[in-house]
Amino acid sequence: MGKKRILIADDEEAIRILLAMALKTYDYEVDIVKNGLEAINNIYKRSYDLIITDYMMPEMDGLELTKRIRSEYPFIPILIVSANGPVHDFLKSGATACIPKPFNIFELQNIIKTMLNRNSERI
């Protein structure tokens, strides 16, 4: 089994870089994009084991992205990281989990490991 592939969609460059660096320490393959539209385009080109998305982004927000992913790829886990937003709507639209910003990077890493392990068990 190869490296786990994770896609990060966030319009804040600092968050994208922080998440990518934190996840690469676990030897995950990480792609980063700055909005939901770019995320959808990447998902059409490559397969991912996990999607991490912000809520508020230009072009397509995290809620719409989650709905689109869920309708076409029902088994990809989705983690929404957001400073504000309708957590109930995120979960209702198909997000696997939500974590508020600002977040503790170690807690985030643990949530991601758990989500990836759970998804591996299902396959």
Image (spheres, rainbow, N blue to C red):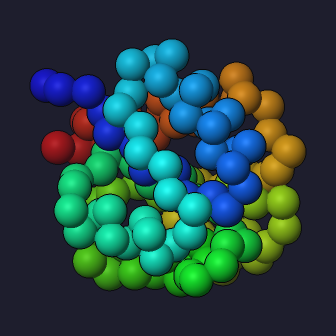
Position of residue 104 in the picture relative to residue 49 (left or right): right
33 lies above or below 63: above
Q: Quadrant of the N terminus?
A: top left
Q: Which residue occupies 79% across, 52% down? A: 100
Q: 116 or 42: which is nearer to us? A: 42
Q: 3 or 85: which is nearer to us? A: 3
Number of residue marks: 0
11 lies above or below 52: below
Residue 83 sits in which quadrant?
A: bottom right
Q: Is residue 121 visible?
A: yes
Q: Residue furthest front?
A: 13
Q: Which residue occupies 51% across, 72% down? A: 36
Position of residue 48 in the picture relative to residue 63 (left or right): left
Q: Quadrant of the C terminus?
A: top left
Residue 5 sits in which quadrant?
A: top left
76 lies above or below 22: below
Residue 85 sits in which quadrant?
A: bottom right
Q: Which residue occupies 82% across, 50% down? A: 101
Q: Is residue 93 visible?
A: no
Name the spot of residue 114 as percent of width and height, x first: 48, 32
Name the spot of residue 105 as percent of width and height, x first: 72, 29
Position of residue 25 in the picture relative to residue 71 (left or right): right
Q: Which residue occupies 70% across, 23% down? A: 106
Name the spot of residue 37 as percent of width and height, x first: 46, 77
